[in-house]
Structures are given as C-alpha cells and as structure tokens.
Image: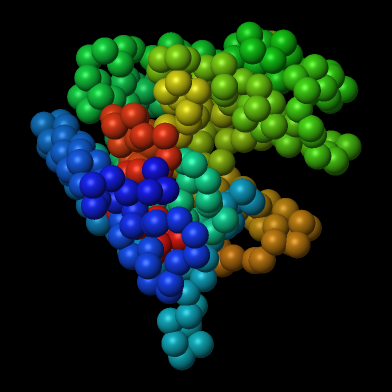
C-alpha cells in the first residue's frame, strides 16, 4: 500500500510531484506495525517454550557468501578496511553452534543488493534457527508448528512433496533425468519467455520452471518441497545416489499459497566439501563477471573444529507478517522500505 495514506496514517503522498522530504511518512499503517510486534513476541514465546536460545550476530562481517544469486554489499570501514553487510546470519550462527551454543534462533536484519519488488526489499528481517541433532524432515515439522502458532490452527499441516514430484505434477517433466531439450519444451508449453540459456545450463532451466510454472501451482495451503537436485545443495548435505535415485540435496523449501516462505538444510558439516563448494562458486563468479568476495575462513575453521549434525532454516519474517495481515505488498508491513529509508 505504498500509495496514498488513510486518515493521516501511512504514506503521505498527495499525488503529482512532491517536494524533497515530502515522503517522510511510513508506508505501513500503525495497525500493521502493532501486528508485526505481536508476531515477533509470539515467535520469541514459541522458541522460549522450546528451550531455543535467542542470539544476536554481526550485521557487518569480514566475509560473505559467494553464492551467485545473492548480491552482497561492501561497506567502507575506513583505513582501507572493507566489511560486508550480511545476507544471512548463517555463517555466524554456525560458528556459535560449533562453539557449543545448542539450539539457537535469531530475528536478524539482513541486506541484499538488487532486492526489490512486491515481496522484496533491500533490507529485511530473517527468522533463522538451528537444531543440533535434527534432520531436515524433523525441522519441517517445527516450521509447521510455528506457522500454526502465529497464523492459527486453520493453516493446516504442510503437504510434503519431493522436488521431483512437484515438477512431474505441475510441469510434466522429471527434473533429475529429463534431457535439456525436454526442459526447453516444458518452458515453451508454458508460454514462458526464456532467456538464452547456456548449452549445459540445467539449473537455469529448472529455476525458471520452478519460479514461473511450479511455484504458482503450489498450494493454496502450506507445501514443503524436499530432495532437491544435488547441484542446488548450497550449504546442505547431499545424499548419495541409491536404488536408482540420483544424488539429492537434503534441503527443503516451504511455500504458503505458492509464495516461498522458508528455506532449510540438513546442514553440511564437512569443511573440505564446504571449501570446495565455496571455491566453485568463486570460480563461477569470476567466469560470469561478478565481483569477487572473500572466503569465510572463520566459518571453515568452525566446521573443522566440529560443527554438530544440525538442521537449520531461514524464514522470511516480513512475508510471515504479510500472510498474517493479508498484505499485498511488503511495503504494507515495513515502516520505511528502501525508497523511503
């Protein structure tokens, strides 16, 4: 609702050209900010009752993720020093886990360049938590419990589907085995304007089909997808091929009404494999002309010291508030989105 305000609340736009500073008002109504505060309190109560420790970690770090699809923003710290605004508290929280913190959660402010749209803002809040001794399937159950606690019992349990089942049902292809020509045909059937993919860019095709064909058909309730392609493992473990099944990433994503809400992993604990993945991402960044980022040696050292077997998940808190309030835009649940910051 980043247009006109209501009864003196929310946006102060009056149409037409505005003088500098005329857009000083928040885009969220007070009622939305009250509901946001209530949801934050409910989240904290949920984890307190379960013995999960709330933590805080730095917004500016010495390193950042090399992931290709996330734009990390550098900060000039003076004296030639450079820091990085964190796109997620994940690396710092894993260092806490390795140091023996036990189960932890955080409502973290994070920043990602290039994030803009109806459900995106450059600066936003992630609810992230980690459960030592759990796998990703057990953590899906806790995500369900949290949604019920915040959104009410009517939200229902998640429909659990493998990534392959979702693609076969909604796109008519097997994402793990279909030849690239078959993926291209599925894109064409959907009437999607596809970019010029590289000859071997399987994941690019799958990401496009997921975003424009599969995701909109998930729901209308809660859906949890799991068993992603190994090439999309990110920081999750990979389950080796077995019984005719391909190797699969032990990660999940939770959707509500076709909107992605959470992304979780059965966490990778092998420092050598994590280094290999980081270096592979850095090589891809160089090949595609993306700016280099420093390797997080402290995270790798923490993994080497012994990260406990864990499952972790990051949930978009602003999107959760949108669901709870029925907001159609993230601007309706933020006091000051990027364009008014």
- Which of the pair 37/52 is nearer the observer? 37
Q: Quadrant of residue 213?
A: top right
Vertical arrangement, residue 78 with respect to residue 226, above or below: below
Q: Is residue 83 left or right of residue 239?
A: left
Q: Position of residue 152 (x, y in %)?
A: 22, 19
- Residue 122 seen: yes
Q: Position of residue 4 (x, y in %)?
A: 38, 49
Looking at the rendered structure, the number of numbered marks drawn on it comes to: 0
Vertical arrangement, residue 37 with respect to residue 95, above or below: above
Q: Is residue 132 left or right of residue 233?
A: left
Q: Quadrant of the C terminus?
A: bottom left
Q: Going 52% across and 17% down the picture, which residue do you hit?
A: 218
Q: Is residue 183 left or right of residue 147?
A: right
Q: Quadrant of the N terminus?
A: top left
Q: Position of residue 310 (x, y in %)?
A: 36, 35
Q: Position of residue 260 (x, y in %)?
A: 48, 31
Q: Is residue 14 left or right of residue 66?
A: left
Q: Going 20% across and 41% down the picture, which residue do you hit?
A: 31
Q: Going 30% across and 36% down the picture, which residue do you hit?
A: 321
- Which of the pair 30/121 is nearer the observer? 30
- Which of the pair 170/103 is nearer the observer? 170
Q: Going 38% across and 26% down the picture, which residue do you hit?
A: 135
Vertical arrangement, residue 267 with respect to residue 152, above or below: below
Q: Quadrant of residue 24?
A: bottom left
- Residue 33 seen: no
**Colouring of the image:** rainbow
């Amino acid at each position: 609702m980043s247009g006109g305000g209501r009864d003196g609340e929310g946006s102060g736009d009056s149409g037409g050209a505005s003088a500098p500073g005329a857009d000083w008002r928040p885009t969220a109504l007070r009622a939305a900010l009250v509901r946001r505060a209530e949801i934050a309190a409910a989240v904290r109560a949920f984890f307190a009752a379960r013995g999960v420790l709330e933590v805080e970690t730095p917004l500016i770090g010495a390193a950042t993720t090399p992931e290709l699809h996330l734009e990390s923003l550098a900060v000039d710290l003076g004296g030639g020093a450079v820091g990085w605004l964190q796109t997620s508290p994940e690396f710092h929280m894993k260092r806490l886990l390795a140091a023996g913190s036990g189960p932890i959660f955080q409502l973290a402010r994070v920043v990602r360049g290039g994030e803009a749209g109806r459900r995106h803002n450059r600066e936003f809040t992630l609810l992230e938590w980690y459960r030592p001794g759990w796998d990703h399937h057990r953590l899906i159950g806790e995500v369900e419990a949290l949604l019920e606690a915040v959104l009410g019992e009517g939200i229902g349990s998640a429909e659990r589907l493998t990534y392959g089942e979702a693609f076969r049902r909604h796109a008519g292809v097997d994402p793990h085995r279909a030849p690239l020509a078959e993926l291209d045909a599925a894109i064409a059937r959907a009437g999607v304007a596809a970019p010029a993919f590289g000859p071997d860019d399987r994941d690019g095709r799958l990401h496009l089909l997921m975003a424009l064909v599969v995701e909109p058909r998930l729901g209308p309730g809660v859906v949890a997808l799991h068993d992603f392609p190994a090439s999309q493992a990110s920081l999750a473990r990979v389950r080796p091929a077995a019984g005719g099944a391909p190797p699969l990433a032990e990660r999940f994503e939770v959707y509500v009404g076709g909107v992605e809400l959470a992304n979780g992993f059965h966490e990778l604990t092998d420092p050598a494999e994590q280094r290999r993945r980081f270096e592979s991402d850095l090589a891809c960044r160089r090949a595609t002309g993306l700016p280099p980022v420093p390797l997080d040696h402290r995270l790798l050292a923490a993994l080497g010291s012994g990260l406990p077997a864990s499952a972790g998940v990051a949930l978009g808190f602003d999107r959760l508030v949108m669901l709870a309030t029925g907001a159609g835009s993230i601007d309706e649940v933020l006091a000051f989105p990027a364009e008014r910051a």
